Amino acid sequence: MLESGGTDVADIARATRTFRAQGFLVAVDDSGAGHSNIDRLLTLKPDIVKLDRSLVRAQTALSAQTPAHLRDALMPKLVDLLHEPGMFVVAEGIETPDDLMLAARSNVDFVQGFLFGKPAAHLAPRGTATPLFEHIFDTLAQMRRTECLASDLLLMPYR
């Protein structure tokens, strides 16, 4: 379901309950763009929330007034908030290793984007994306070790 304005949320909520009763999962697309808001997510209670590429793209800030470091700090908190009631989170628009790093640091469940391949008639060979993920998670683990060491060094005089 697209998350855009102009639709009665109560009607959509009734429809999602009906679909769910038939065994379907409910997904909200482009969350974080346009008319999307937390109230709609809380009312609809989707199983999957697909974050709009404007939230994910490491090359662009949320707006001209929002610095990238604020977006980088906000993204993991947003994902945590969506995980709290059990929603899965998909990050779309992953086009660079920096985008993938932001998604990994934010603990998203699924990613999609041109970094993994352009639309094609055939599936990519199995394991094509594995080196990308291994590199990102190795880098992330090293970053976390470095952050922990820096924190320990900062506190050492006070122990």
Image (cartoon, helix red, strand yellow):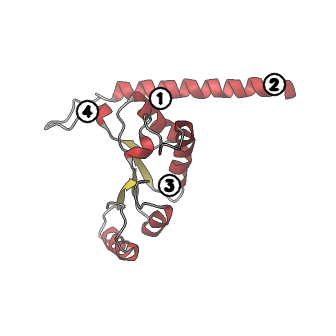
Q: Residue at x 42, y 67 (%)?
A: 44
Q: CA distance from mark 1 to mark 3?
A: 22 Å
The residue that disc 4 covers is 117
Circle 2 residues within 10 Å: few <14, some 14–19, many ≥20: few
Circle 4 residues within 10 Å: few <14, some 14–19, many ≥20: few
Above or below, 10 relative to 1: below
> Of the residues shown, which amino acid type is indicated by label 2?
Met
The residue that disc 2 covers is 156
In-front residue for pair 129/13: 13
Q: Nearer the viewer, mark 1 or mark 3?
A: 3
Q: Quadrant of the N terminus?
A: bottom left
**Pointer 4 and pointer 1: residues touching (CB < 8 Å)?**
no
Instruction: Examine the image and state in which quarter residue 70 appears.
Output: top right
Task: Residue 150 in the image: state x and y as whole percent.
Answer: 70, 24
Q: Which mark is residue 82?
A: 3
Task: Residue 46 in the image: state x and y as whole percent.
Answer: 41, 62
Nearest to N terminus: mark 2 or mark 1: 1
Circle 1 residues within 10 Å: few <14, some 14–19, many ≥20: some
> Of the residues shown, which amino acid type is indicated by label 1?
Phe
The kind of secondary structure element at disc 1 is: helix
**Pointer 1 and pointer 3: residues touching (CB < 8 Å)?**
no
Classify residue 3 as left or right of residue 39.
left
Q: Which mark is residue 137?
A: 1
Q: Which mark is residue 153?
A: none
Circle 3 residues within 10 Å: few <14, some 14–19, many ≥20: many
In-front residue for pair 35/98: 35
Classify residue 81 as left or right of residue 97.
right
Q: CA distance from mark 4 to mark 3?
A: 27 Å
